[in-house]
Amino acid sequence: MKKKVSIVIPTYNEEDNIRPVSEAVVEEIRLNLSDYDYEILIIDNNSQDNTANIIRELCKENKKIKAIFNEKNFGPDSSPYYGLLQSDGDCTILFCADFQDPLEMIHKLVREWEKGYNVVTAIKSESQENKLVRYFRTIYYRLIKKISDTEIIEHFTGFGCFDRNFIDILRNLDDSVPFLRGVVAEFAGNRKSIEYVQQKRRAGKSHIRFFTLYDMAMRSFTSYTKVGLRMCTFFGFAVAFISVIIAIVYFVMKLLNWYEFDYGVPVILIGMFFLGAVQLIFMGFMGEYILMINRRVMKRPLVVERERINFEVIEDEEK
C-alpha cells in the first residue's frame, strides 16, 4: 500500500492562484512522487472573491482535493494550523497558494522526511521580498532567539514537512492560540532544515498587514519568553534604587544650602512624565501576557467550519 502525502494549502482571496497552484502540485507529485498517494487539503479563510467557487470546481474535478471553508476569517495562523490537524497523510506539507514556495521543494522535503526526521523545515536563505522588511524580520528573529526560553528557528515561515506523529502532538496540545514556528522549535527534536529561495508572489497581493505581524510577534514574545515581565520587575527595582539615591542627594544639598537650593520644577515634571511613560509601556507588556492567558483559558475553537468537501469520499475509498 502506498504511503500518502498531504498538501495543506491555506487560501484567502487567491482566485488567480488557487487553480494554477493546485494543478502544479498535482503535476509535481505525478512526476517526482509517483510512489506516493496524495491528498490536497485547501482551507479557505472566508475569501471575499471567487476563490471558494474555484475550489468547489477543483473538488469536483479531482476527488483527492479536499476543501474546508471557514465561517469567517480566523487569521493567518489559526487557519493553516487547523488545516494541518485535519490532514491524514503519513506526512503533511504546509504550502502557500501564491507560488512563493518553490514546487520542487515538495519532493525534496518528502525525500528528507523519508530519512526518519519528524519535521523537515524549509528555511528562507534568500527572499525577493522588500529588503527593509527582511532586515527587520532578521533583527526580530535574532532578538527573540536571544531572549527566548526555546530556540526559535530563523526565517522559518511554517513551510515544511511534518510527520504524522508530529501532527498527533499538535492535536494533543489542544492549543487555542497556536504559534506553529514556536511549537516546531519546542517539540520537534528530530528535525532537519533545508534552505530555499523564496520567490515573488505570482498574482494578487499579500493580505498580511502591520497589526497582523504585530500580533504574531506578541504571540511569540508572550508564549516563549519571560523577559517582558522580568524586565518590568528589574526596572522597577532599579528606578526605586536610583530614586532613593536622588532623594538622599537632594536632601543633603537642601540641608547644606537651605535658602539657595531650588528643587527645580522642570526636573520633577520630566521625571514624572518619564516614569508615567515607562509605566504605560510595562502595563502594555503585562496586558499582552494577560490577553494571551485569557485567550488560552477561554479555549475557543481554532476555526468554525461552514462546509467541507470530499472528506467522506476519501474515507470511503480508504475503507
Image (spheres, rainbow, N blue to C red):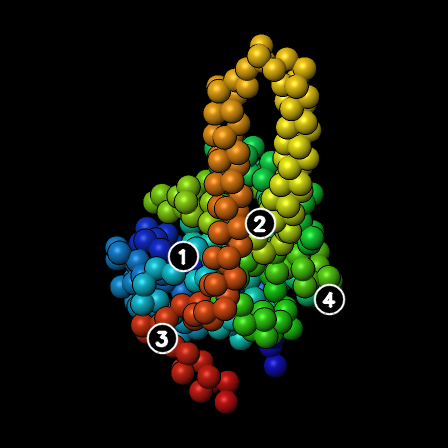
> Between marks 1 and 2, how big is the CA–CA gap?
18 Å
Q: Earlier in the sequence, mark 2 or mark 3?
A: 2
Q: Earlier in the sequence, mark 4 or mark 2?
A: 4
Which label lies toward us, 4 or 2?
A: 2
Say if residue 4 shows up in the picture: no
Which label lies toward us, 4 or 1?
A: 1
Q: Earlier in the sequence, mark 3 or mark 1?
A: 1
- Going by the numbered disc 3, the residue's amino acid type is Ile
Which label lies toward us, 3 or 1?
A: 1
- For label 1, the SS is helix
Which label lies toward us, 2 or 3?
A: 2
- Going by the numbered disc 2, the residue's amino acid type is Phe
Q: Earlier in the sequence, mark 1 or mark 2?
A: 1
Q: Position of residue 141 (x, y in %)?
A: 61, 42
Q: Which residue is mark 4?
A: 116
- Going by the numbered disc 4, the residue's amino acid type is Gly
Q: Position of residue 33 (x, y in %)?
A: 58, 64
- Quarter in which the N terminus is drawn: bottom right
> Between marks 3 and 1, how big is the CA–CA gap?
21 Å
- For label 2, the SS is helix
Q: Which mark is residue 309?
A: 3
- Going by the numbered disc 1, the residue's amino acid type is Gly
